[in-house]
Image (tube, rainbow, N blue to C red):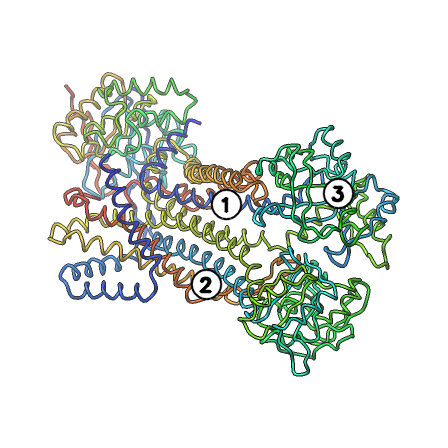
């Protein structure tokens, strides 16, 4: 009974530092590490700890097998965690950087997404004429009535057909995307069956090079250029709205209209003006707001998945570490008992065991992080976005993420080392001296 | 008395790399059934090797070895194993019990190789333990027993399949005087009252006093063969 | 098996080490159970046996383009077609976008093509007879506490009514059940009459979302599909017809290569597990060489010792793994209970256990092989003297 109480109280005391560790920013952890190093160099107990640790490290080679278990186990945890979180971060980043605060997208009232929305020509003209909409040099409002449809093309990765989003854009579309630029070929000419292809779509699908011919609804279209916007629009192919509408027999209406406002502050007035207009039944969002919402639920699901998977793997790694350190302590029982008989206190032993575990954990974490970074950073993938079409995004392995992975590794090392360390320090000297 | 062990020109050579070590040279020996033999000699004399060969733990390099009418010198490992489980009981210096099993289960081990059912195995083990006077310790783990008690469990294990031959390698080597005496008395009892042939290697002259016949080995050959009258 | 207690005793000789190792195995197979449950869910729809004789016809251009209703009779007339029906995606919202569930308007004979949805004859008739009638799956009804007779208002996201309002109010006239637990996600839906939908909708009247076709002979499905597509060739509504399974599989594959993700994670996990348990087994055997030698002394053959060590290794994997799978089963049950049947997780049963047990035995053998060989090969005399 006492044993269970001891274990529980130890678990409780171990929990707090572990949680702090998980939450600590890198500079705090570095400061802590420096403090420990200083303690080991300057105080007597610290120096004792240092010498015990030195002995431990020197015998590490003998325990290579079990030490490897800790390193590999933790590398696995960190690798998977970083990879999955990078996937979520990348997806979110792609959609998050889509859109600005001073452009707005207008949909039919009640439609949550472009695909569910319809606006007729009259409505789009009324919206474009709103006073908050910025006008170009010639007095033309900067507005783009847009039509989104889907084209089925074979993916480069497996040759199976998947859907790519085809967006009909208005003449002023270029003025709505600050980072838009043509990377090859030219813009399409209004009125022609010409397409420009986004960077992401080009990478994911076959048959979209400049000069390629596509059949859309039985009609031949030509790819005349490739573009880059630095956001989720890179997954799309663009054409002229009226021509796309004709090809897909959707004359007379579009899905949405995107406008550039005079400035970001004008949005609220714009929205109110549209709501108050009896001719319209529409909803308006800033483009930033609109695209953010698209990514939220998927990113969150991937994050939950990643964290859950990593947590279970971490549990397995903790048990592995416990096993290894427990064996390590047992093997060195006589050595530890001798040291304590000679006058070394419990603390140096605890510190030594913990340090050993955490060094192994850090090594494993570094390996896992390195593998995740080298394999997955900027790894391009695509998944189903709204409108049943593919959204292309890149995995994003940030330093923040790598640090997260390392803190998990250290936490696992800490938990895996704390029990054996405590046991080592508490082992009765006499029985330790007798151990085989 | 019938001859149990018949040894002709027995030799054993170990090759370690390029070195040839001849541990036994052409040993000739007959051991009668029901005898109590002590094998003695300086270290390196080959006495343990001879014991291992008689016990079927190893195969000779040359010569013949016939036990109970059965030639076992050129028999394969699997057949030797089978032969051992039915015909020889072993008692080692360091007992060699399974630490994770109870005394009872340890004694039953040789019977696992037979067709006997669980109840029968339990019964036979019980009888063997009773014989060595440890019935009330049947359910103790071997680690909970003293050295002398462990050795007695080992003896019970050695006789549970009722073998003709009991082979001991320094059976009292790790015991204090009193326990050693107990163990030797037990071996004497098994030899005298149950007709078991006992062959043991020993350093201890006091242990050798229990044997009727003492064989001295030196450098791989038999140098002395003494028989005494037993009380 | 009479050797069982020997194997068990060997396994638990070092209680702490075995305990921690078992926990690691448990964690690995807990993860396996959870991930395989997710992977299975994504492939379940494409493995639905009853769907094997159904074809789906959609617009070749895009999933979102409608097809004319007039195709119904022409498809029905294609040789090899047993029955034809159609449906249209509605996509309404009940009270809150967070409550989202699929809603579709369907033709009168729709339920004929989905016999695996069990519904009473009276409720079917009520659905047929009530213009504004709707049927929902049992799980969905339970989630919202709906009973037959309730009115369900849906907010349209795509299809406003012709009077301009966004609200479609339907009468719940029937509740259907799906028996197969792997397909219970199909209960998470609402169906109402296409006739009402078409009459009351504002735009695109006379069009349907897709056709569902039941073929007479499963083996001739490809030919029938081609014939159906030939009907609309070179028209303004070209179609693409494929088996329901192929359709679902293609859809799932667009989401993500779930198989690859799950496979990679489990690969990493099992690699670590092999290392961990391998290390444990190696240590365990190394420590027990003298004991194994004694077993040989007592009559165990070389192969007997090999088998003993292998059994110990497999037992270790199976004990930990079965516990892990059982825990996964409990976890998945709880998650499905909490989040409804449309969460993409299959209950942990049948094939997941088969695969899991197979893996446990395989890993047990792989991990125990070298130590077992070592045990098999040891020479009694050398081992006893500690050489």
Q: CA distance from mark 2 to mark 1?
A: 22 Å
Of tags 3 and 1, the one toward the viewer is 3
Residue at image location 75% in from the left, 35% down from the top: C130
* Residue A198 position by quadrant: bottom right
Q: Which part of the image, by quadrant, shows the C terminus of chain A?
A: top left
Q: Which residue is mark 2?
A: A371
Q: Which residue is mark 1?
A: C32
In the rendering, at what x and y percent does residue B210 appear?
Answer: 17, 25
Marks 3/1 same chain: yes
In which chain is the residue bearing label 2?
A
Structural crowding at the residue carrying mark 2, measured as other residues with C-alpha within 10 Å and reported as few (<14), some (14–19) or many (≥20): some
Of tags 2 and 3, the one toward the viewer is 3
Q: Are marks 3 and 1 in contact (CB under 8 Å)?
A: no
Judge left or right: residue A37 versus residue A177. left
Judge left or right: residue B3 versus residue A120. left
In the rendering, at what x and y percent does residue C184 appear?
Answer: 62, 38
Q: Nearer the viewer, residue A385 or A77?
A: A385
Structural crowding at the residue carrying mark 3, measured as other residues with C-alpha within 10 Å and reported as few (<14), some (14–19) or many (≥20): many
Q: Nearer the viewer, residue B195 or A113?
A: A113
As helix, strand or loop, the secondary structure at mark 3 comes to strand
In the rendering, at what x and y percent does residue C376 appear?
Answer: 41, 41
In which chain is the residue bearing label 1?
C
Dot 3 or dot 1: first in sequence order is 1
As helix, strand or loop, the secondary structure at mark 1 comes to helix
In the rendering, at what x and y percent does residue A180 appear?
Answer: 61, 76
For residue C106, the mark is 3
């Amino acid at each position: 009974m006492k044993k269970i109480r001891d274990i529980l109280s130890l678990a409780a005391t171990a929990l707090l530092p572990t949680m702090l560790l998980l939450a600590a920013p890198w500079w705090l952890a570095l400061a802590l590490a420096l403090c420990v190093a200083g303690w080991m160099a300057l105080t007597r107990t610290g120096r004792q700890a240092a010498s015990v640790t030195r002995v431990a490290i020197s015998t590490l080679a003998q325990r290579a097998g079990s030490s490897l278990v800790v390193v590999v186990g933790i590398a696995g945890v960190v690798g998977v965690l970083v990879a999955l979180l990078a996937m979520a971060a990348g997806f979110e980043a792609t959609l998050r950087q889509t859109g600005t605060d001073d452009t707005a997208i207008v949909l039919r009232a009640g439609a949550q997404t472009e695909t569910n929305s319809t606006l007729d020509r009259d409505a789009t003209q009324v919206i474009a004429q709103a006073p908050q909409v910025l006008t170009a040099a010639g007095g033309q409002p900067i507005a783009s009535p847009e039509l989104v449809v889907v084209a089925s093309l074979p993916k480069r990765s497996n040759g199976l057909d998947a859907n790519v989003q085809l967006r009909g854009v208005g003449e002023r579309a270029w003025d709505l995307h600050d980072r838009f630029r043509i990377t090859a070929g030219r813009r399409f000419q209004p009125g022609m069956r010409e397409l420009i292809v986004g960077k992401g779509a080009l990478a994911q699908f076959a048959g979209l090079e400049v000069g390629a011919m596509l059949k859309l609804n039985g009609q031949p279209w030509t790819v005349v250029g490739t573009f880059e916007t630095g956001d989720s629009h890179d997954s799309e192919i663009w054409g002229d709205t009226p021509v796309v509408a004709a090809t897909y027999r959707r004359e007379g209406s579009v899905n949405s209209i995107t406008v550039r406002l005079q400035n970001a502050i004008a949005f609220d007035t714009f929205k109110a003006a549209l709501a108050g207009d009896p001719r319209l039944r529409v909803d308006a969002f800033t483009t930033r707001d609109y695209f953010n919402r698209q990514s939220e639920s998927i990113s969150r699901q991937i994050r939950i998945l990643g964290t859950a998977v990593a947590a279970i793997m971490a549990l397995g790694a903790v048990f592995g570490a416990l096993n290894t350190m427990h064996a390590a302590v047992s093997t060195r029982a006589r050595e530890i008992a001798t040291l304590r008989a000679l006058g070394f206190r419990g603390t140096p032993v605890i510190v030594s065991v913990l340090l050993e575990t955490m060094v192994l954990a850090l090594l494993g974490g570094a390996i896992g992080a390195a593998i995740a970074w080298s394999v997955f950073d900027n790894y391009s993938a695509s998944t189903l976005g709204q409108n049943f079409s593919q959204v292309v995004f890149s995995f994003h392995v940030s330093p923040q993420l790598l640090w997260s992975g390392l803190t998990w590794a250290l936490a696992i090392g800490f938990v895996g080392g704390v029990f054996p360390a405590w046991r080592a320090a508490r082992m009765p000297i006499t029985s330790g001296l007798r151990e085989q | 008395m019938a001859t149990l062990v018949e040894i002709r020109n027995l030799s054993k050579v170990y090759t370690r790399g390029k070195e040839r070590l001849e541990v036994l040279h052409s040993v000739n020996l007959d051991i009668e059934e029901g005898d109590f033999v002590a094998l003695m000699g300086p270290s390196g004399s080959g006495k343990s090797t001879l014991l291992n060969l008689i016990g079927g733990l190893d195969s000779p390099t040359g010569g013949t070895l016939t036990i109970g009418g059965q030639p076992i010198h050129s028999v394969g490992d699997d057949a030797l194993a089978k032969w051992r489980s039915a015909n020889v009981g072993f008692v080692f210096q360091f007992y060699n019990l399974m630490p994770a099993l109870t005394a009872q289960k340890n004694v039953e081990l040789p019977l696992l190789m037979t067709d006997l059912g669980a109840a029968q195995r339990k019964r036979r083990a019980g009888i063997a333990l009773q014989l060595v006077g440890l019935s009330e310790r049947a359910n103790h783990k071997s680690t909970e027993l003293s050295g002398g008690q462990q050795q007695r469990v080992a003896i019970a294990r050695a006789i549970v399949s009722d073998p003709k031959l009991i082979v001991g390698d320094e059976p009292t080597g790790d015991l204090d005087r009193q326990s050693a005496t107990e163990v030797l008395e037990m071996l004497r009892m098994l030899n005298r009252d149950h007709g078991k042939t006992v062959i043991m290697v020993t350093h201890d002259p006091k242990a050798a006093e229990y044997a009727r016949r003492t064989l001295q080995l030196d450098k791989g050959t038999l140098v002395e063969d003494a028989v005494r009258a037993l009380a | 098996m009479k050797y069982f207690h020997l194997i068990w005793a060997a396994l638990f000789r070092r209680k702490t080490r075995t305990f921690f190792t078992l926990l690691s195995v448990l964690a690995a197979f807990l993860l396996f159970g959870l991930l395989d449950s997710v992977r299975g869910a994504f492939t379940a729809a494409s493995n639905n046996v009853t769907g094997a004789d159904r074809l789906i016809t959609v617009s070749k251009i895009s999933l979102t383009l409608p097809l004319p209703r007039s195709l119904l009779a022409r498809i029905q007339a294609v040789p090899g077609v047993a029955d034809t029906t159609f449906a249209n995606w509605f996509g309404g919202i009940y009270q809150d976008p967070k409550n989202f569930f699929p809603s579709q308007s369907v033709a009168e004979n729709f339920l004929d093509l989905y016999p695996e949805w069990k519904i009473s004859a009276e409720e079917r008739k009520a659905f047929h007879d009530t213009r504004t009638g709707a049927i929902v799956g049992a799980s969905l009804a339970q989630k919202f506490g709906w009973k037959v007779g309730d009115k369900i208002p849906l907010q349209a996201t795509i299809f406003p009514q012709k009077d301009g309002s966004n609200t479609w109010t339907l009468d719940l006239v029937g509740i259907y059940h799906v028996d197969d637990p792997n397909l219970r996600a199909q209960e998470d839906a609402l169906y109402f009459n296409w006739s009402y939908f078409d009459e009351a909708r504002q735009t695109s009247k006379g069009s349907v979302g897709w056709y569902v076709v039941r073929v007479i002979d499963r083996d001739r499905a490809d030919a029938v599909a081609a014939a159906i597509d030939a009907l609309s060739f070179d028209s303004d509504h070209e179609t693409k017809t494929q088996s329901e399974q192929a359709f679902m599989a293609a859809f799932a594959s667009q989401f993500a290569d779930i198989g690859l993700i799950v496979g990679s994670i489990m690969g990493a996990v099992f690699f670590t597990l092999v290392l961990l348990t391998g290390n444990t087994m190696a240590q365990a055997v190394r420590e027990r060489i003298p004991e194994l030698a004694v077993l040989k002394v007592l009559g165990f053959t070389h192969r007997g010792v090999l088998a003993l060590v292998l059994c110990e290794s497999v037992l270790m994997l199976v004990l930990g793994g079965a516990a892990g799978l059982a825990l996964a089963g409990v976890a998945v049950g709880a998650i499905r209970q909490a989040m409804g049947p449309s969460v993409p997780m299959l209950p942990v049963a049948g094939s997941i256990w088969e695969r899991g047990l197979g893996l446990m035995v395989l890993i047990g053998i792989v991990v125990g092989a070298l130590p077992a060989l070592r045990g098999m090969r040891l020479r009694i005399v050398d081992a006893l003297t500690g050489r």
